[in-house]
């Protein structure tokens, strides 16, 4: 970079214009490459923390995606396998967390209304399994408690149905 700047200055000093605009464009592009790589490294650190703590995933996803795009802008052959793998892991983690929160919301509504608990149980069971597979252990305890309450409600509804509508 320093040599390129010196060469541009020398060319300007001797009024040489052949290739000067190309050299200046290259210099302007190179000035942006290192900050893009630095941002990618920082985004990778933040993404790693999010993967370990299962928190801040959305911010990490956005930052890492932007950083990957920033590096791709300057280099088609940049080695982005690791950042892209981390992006995929973060997306799966975020998706599992969102699914679990949605299932908890549905289950809570079902518990309050005392309706549709079987569908809520099924959704919550699937979301819990996915969350556990993804290592979202901190997020599952309240979901497990809700699942037990829904199963209890479902059992009570089945007992009432059996009493009201006897088998033929």
Image (cartoon, rainbow, N blue to C red):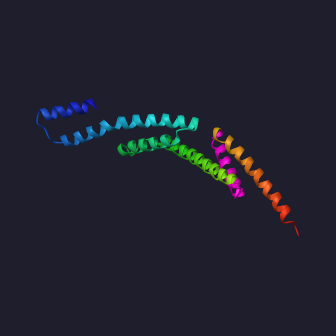
Q: Quadrant of the C terminus?
A: bottom right
Task: Please check the rendered image and state whether residue 122 is part of the magenta-colored stretch, yes or no.
Answer: yes
- In this view, the residue farthest toward the left is 15
Up the image or down, 22 lies above or below 121; here it is above
**Left or right of 71: which side holds 104?**
right
Magenta part mainly helix, strand or loop? helix
Q: Give residue 36's position: percent from left, percent from top.
A: 37, 38
Q: Quadrant of residue 135?
A: top right
Q: Give residue 132's position: percent from left, percent from top.
A: 67, 43
Residue occupying image coordinates x 44% and y 34%: 42
- Closer to us: 117 or 75: 117
The stretch of residues the image draws in magenta is 113-137
Residue occupying image coordinates x 30% and y 37%: 30
Q: Give residue 21's position: percent from left, percent from top.
A: 19, 42
Residue occupying image coordinates x 46% and y 37%: 43
- Closer to us: 106 or 5: 106
**Left or right of 72: which side holds 164?**
right
- Closer to us: 104 or 31: 104
- In this view, the residue farthest toward the right is 168
Q: Give residue 140's position: percent from left, percent from top.
A: 67, 42
Task: Please check the rendered image and state whether residue 57 is part of the magenta-colored stretch, yes or no.
Answer: no
């Amino acid at each position: 970079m320093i040599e390129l700047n010196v060469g541009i200055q020398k060319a300007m000093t001797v009024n040489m214009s052949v290739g000067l605009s190309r050299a200046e464009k290259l210099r302007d592009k190179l000035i942006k490459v290192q900050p893009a790589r630095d941002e990618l490294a920082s985004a990778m650190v933040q993404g790693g923390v999010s993967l370990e703590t299962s928190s801040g995933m959305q911010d990490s996803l956005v930052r890492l995606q932007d950083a990957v795009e920033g590096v791709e802008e300057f280099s088609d052959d940049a080695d982005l396998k690791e950042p892209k793998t981390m992006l995929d892991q973060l997306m799966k983690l975020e998706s599992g967390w969102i699914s679990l929160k949605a299932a908890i919301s549905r289950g809570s509504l079902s518990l309050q209304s005392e309706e549709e608990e079987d569908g809520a149980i099924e959704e919550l069971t699937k979301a819990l399994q996915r969350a556990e597979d993804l290592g979202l252990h901190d997020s599952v305890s309240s979901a497990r408690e809700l699942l037990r309450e829904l199963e209890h409600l479902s059992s009570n509804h089945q007992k009432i149905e059996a009493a009201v509508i006897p088998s033929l």
